[in-house]
Structure formats: C-alpha cells, structure tokens
Image (spheres, rainbow, N blue to C red):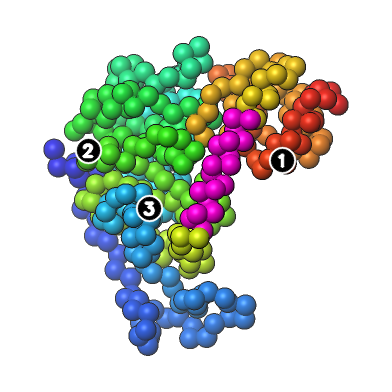
Amino acid sequence: MNVLDLLRPEIRELVPYQPASSAIDALRLNANETPWREIGDKTHRGLNRYPPARPTELATRLAARYGVEPEQILVTRGSSEAIDLIVRSTCRTGKDNILVLTPGFAMYGVYAKVQGAGVKQLALSEADGFRLDAEALLATIDTNTRAVFLCSPNNPTGNAFDRDAINAVVAGLANRAMVVIDEAYREFSDQDCVDLLEYPHVALLRTLSKAYGLAGIRCGALLTHPRLIGALGAVLPPYNLPTPCIELAMASLDPEANSAAGERIRLLRSERARLARALVDLPGVERVFPSDANFLLVRVVDAMNWDQALQRQGILVRRFEGDPSLDGCLRITVGRPEDNDRLLEILAKGADS
C-alpha cells in the first residue's frame, strides 16, 4: 500500500503554499514586514519579522530528543493541532469515521464532529482495569474507519495500555487505517512506542505541555512516516508556531533545562506514588486507580461534595459530569510536595469541612 493512500484524495493532490523565503541575515524586502521592532520585544528574531514558515531547527532538536529522524517530525501547536490535522486529512465529510476509546480524551471526537466525520466508540471496562482489548477494537471498526486513537498513558484513567495489545492493533490495521498513539504523558511512564514508527501507518503525538512545563507555549509534535509528514505539512498554514514559542521551546532543550526537567519528572513520579498511598487510607475513597501519568483517577463516595469542598479551599480538581463511566470519579493532578500535603490535609478533615 502507498502510505499516502491513508489520506483523502484532495490532501494527496494538495500543492503546498510557498511563503516568502526567510534567510535570517538577508535584507528582507519580500514579506511586507515592518522594519522596526516594537518596544518591549525581547526576542532574538524580532517580532516584526515572521517566524520561520516551519521551525526546522526546533524540529531537528525535538527529533533528537524523541529518537527519530528530522523528516519524521512535524511541529504543531500542541498535540491538539496534530489531532485536528490527522482527522481533517484522513476523513471525508459524511463518509468516514474514527474510533476512540471511552473514557478517553474527548477532543478526538470533537475534531471528528467538526470535520463531519463519524465517531465509533469502544468502552474500556473499569472492572477490567480499563484494559485495551485489541480483538474487540478490531471487531468494532469498518471499511470507513480512517484513524484509531489510542492515548497511552490514557487520559483520564492514567493507565498505559499493554504493549502486546497495542502491537495487535497496529498489525490488524496495516493497510487499513492510521493508528495514532497519543503519548502526551509518556515521560511519566516506562512505556515508549517510538519503535512502532517502523510501520508507516503509525503516528505518535508528543508535547512539551506536560512533563516539560511549557503548556503556555502550545508546542507539540507529530511523529510519523516522512511521506505523511510532507503531505500533512501542506495542510498546516505557514508560520504556525509564533517566534516566542519557538525560542522558549529551543531554550527548554538546552542541557541545563533538560536536566532540571528530568529532576521534576522524577519528583512527580515519586509524589504520584506517595499521593496514591495516602488517598487510599482516607474515609470516603473507594478506589485509587493505578497511574502512569501525572495524575490520579480516584473514585469517592460523593464526588460532587468532594469537588465543592476543595473549591471552597481554593483547590481545583476535575470532575466528569455527563460521563456515566466516570460517575463518582475525580481526576487529581499531582502537584508539588507542599501542594499534595495541603490537598491531603483538607481531605483528611472530611468533605463537609
């Protein structure tokens, strides 16, 4: 199969827009930019100049971090833009569909609905530990399923899916549909699916928002086959990542910053375990689910009461209204040690305090 056959015919035939060239040391009279910087502009490049049409230097640095070749990576505005890009590029309006797992990240389905694509759902069983059932998944898709989204570690359940099950899904969908493995929480887990990129229909999503503390700059990455990168890149507008975001992302890849991030990741993993042990012993806690992410899913006796009690104390957690599979559950992000201490102190007093 030609890997480009995974995409809509219109996308395969799309001719990329050619922006003005951007040699940084040249006299730029080709892009209708203003020649002066604004007051307060502290960027190296200058905000009066367009950023690179594609941040190739950043892509090269990220590729080295993730263990892929530069031609296998497309830098996006958060991994959310990559999700939208895949759905728009694979699904024909009114004809095709994607498959998602529930409970899972709701934005996969939102982007599909915006595109006018269908959404097939496969429910994960709490009694089965929210395990990925590859056989059930492959039985759920049809000939119009264009992409399957697996979030591992999964949000909001926190568990990483068994690699044998992921491998079975990848094998079963060869020449049929894209398998998109969302690894937004990969740094908090021992699992890494980068080896699956040997299959041309596999795509991985990564982000600097979680483990690397850069949620505010919206920098993510799509990793997949080079030919798909070229075709999907044609769909993105030029200059999709702003100059300050590029420069801050580059700074985060320096050895000193990378070392600091590694220390924070180790601390959060340790705090995750400590918080889980402490929550289990609190009155009203029915279950703390195992987590490979930077959060814990917790089932409590009265989730609404707990949520409101924490809000009164200035603490926000996530309650999933309208999702029957998560009724009675709260998702609690692992904070700094002092943040977790404060949370536990308040909960120990009871939800009615």
What's the amino acid at mark 1? Asp
Q: Which residue is mark 3?
A: 65
Q: Which residues are magenta?
A: 257-274
Left or right of 11 on screen, residue 276: right
Magenta-span inclusion, residue 95: no
| Mark 2 in CB contact with mark 3 (< 8 angstroms) | no
Left or right of 255 on screen, residue 13: left
Q: Which residue is mark 1?
A: 339
Mark earlier in primary sequence (2, 1) = 2
State how far apart marks 1 and 3 are (Cα).
30 Å
Could you tell me which residue is drawn at 50 percent across and 48 percent down? Answer: 262
Left or right of 117 on screen, residue 4: left
Question: Is residue 322 something one can see in this rendering?
Answer: no
What's the amino acid at mark 3? Arg
Could you tell me which residue is drawn at 27 percent across and 61 percent down? Answer: 16
Q: Residues within 10 Å of mark 2 (few under 14, many from 20)?
A: some
Could you tell me which residue is drawn at 39 percent across and 62 percent down? Answer: 58
State how far apart marks 2 and 3 are (Cα).
20 Å
Mark earlier in primary sequence (1, 3) = 3
